[in-house]
Amino acid sequence: MSLAITYDRTGDPAEVLRVNDIGDPGPPADGQIQVKVAAFPIHPGDLLAISTPRTVHGDQATGVEATGEVILTGGQVDRFAPGNRVAFFPHAGAWAQVVNVDAALAVPVPDDVPDHVAAQMLCNPITMLMLRRAAEQHFNVGFDGVVLNNVAASSVGRLFTASAEHHQIATISLVRSDQRAEQLRDRFPSVPVVSTSSHDWVDQVRTAAAGRPIPVVLDPVGGVGVTDLLTVLSPGGSLIIYGELAGEPMSLHAAALLHSGQVIRGMTINRWFSAVAPEQRISDVASAITIATHFTQHFDVAGVYSLDRIADAARHASQPGKIGTVVVTP
């Protein structure tokens, strides 16, 4: 018997997700490893995939990232052995007790990295690396320019701030409440924080920039708020959208872009597989491991749940304002 989280219809994840006995996965094939999963994270993208209306045929596996211990190896696998700790991403059906995973998708977990960090070790750090590379394409970033980091209290947002500080990239954190603003000020004392709960937050962002250009805005929300973000973006700057938390279309008049030279770019982790060279992916994975090792304190956990409490875990993961990632331990 092996339990996994599945769903047979789309909708509210807390209502449609269920624990299902999917049976023994069988021995790993050539090039695969069998992993006993120790922990997996619930990402916003996971919940979006489950809630987006579409036709579902039969039980659908869920999750793409997890960590655990190798218990078997298939043929032609020499990188791993039983007993090794690994993290893997992306593997469809990662939310399970035991999975067979392509060895090429797995990476070793350092001994000093705990499971709750290893579970988040790849997707969020790699997303952050993509954002930093995209931001650094603008010549002002790293010099006199300031990057505006929207939803900076999120897992990716905090990692970006920590990495930007390390690489001497100036940022301004944008959050949705005064409480989140205070939490970020405690964590990153030298980084200005502005809350959109203030009616004059746009002016506060400009004050925090202190006359410096804001050539890049990072935004995982989208929706109607894009219009306000463009008002603080410098002429010729880039608004990089990497999520759709708003769940609504952007409302944008053409005049907002016609005379500003501003650019709106979309970016998702999926493009890392299709648009990034293999050599860059290898480098990014190595960097992700380094980030998990040296920035462990920024891999916050909002809550830990057992597999049979997947509905509670999904509700918690959907809550706005939480700090950290919800983790499930099978």
Image (cartoon, rainbow, N blue to C red):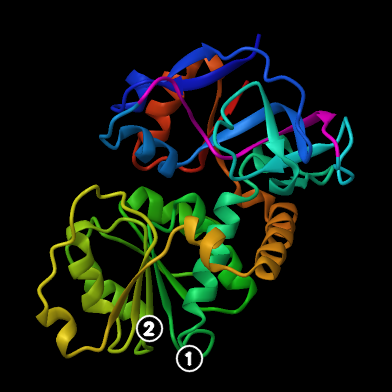
The residue sitting at 56% across, 19% down in the picture is: 4
Q: Quadrant of residue 236?
A: bottom left
Q: Which residues are magenta?
A: 57-75
- Front residue (pair 221, 267): 267
Question: How many C-alpha atoms fall within 10 Å of the one at disc 1: few (<14), some, or many (≥20)?
Answer: few
SS assignment at label 2: loop
The N terminus appears in which quarter of the rendering? Answer: top right
Specify whether residue 188 is in view: no
| Residue 204 screen position, x and y as percent | 28, 72
Q: Is residue 275 above or below residue 57?
A: below
Q: Which residue is mark 1?
A: 139
Q: Residue at x 57, y 43 (%)?
A: 300
Q: Earlier in the sequence, mark 2 or mark 1?
A: 1
Say above or below: 310 vs 106: above
Front-lying residue, 289 or 49: 49
User: What residue type is disc 2 on?
Assistant: Pro
Using the rendered view, name the quadrant where residue 40 is placed: top right
Amino acid at dot 1: Phe
Residue named by callout 2:
215
Residue 197: x, y in percent? 23, 55
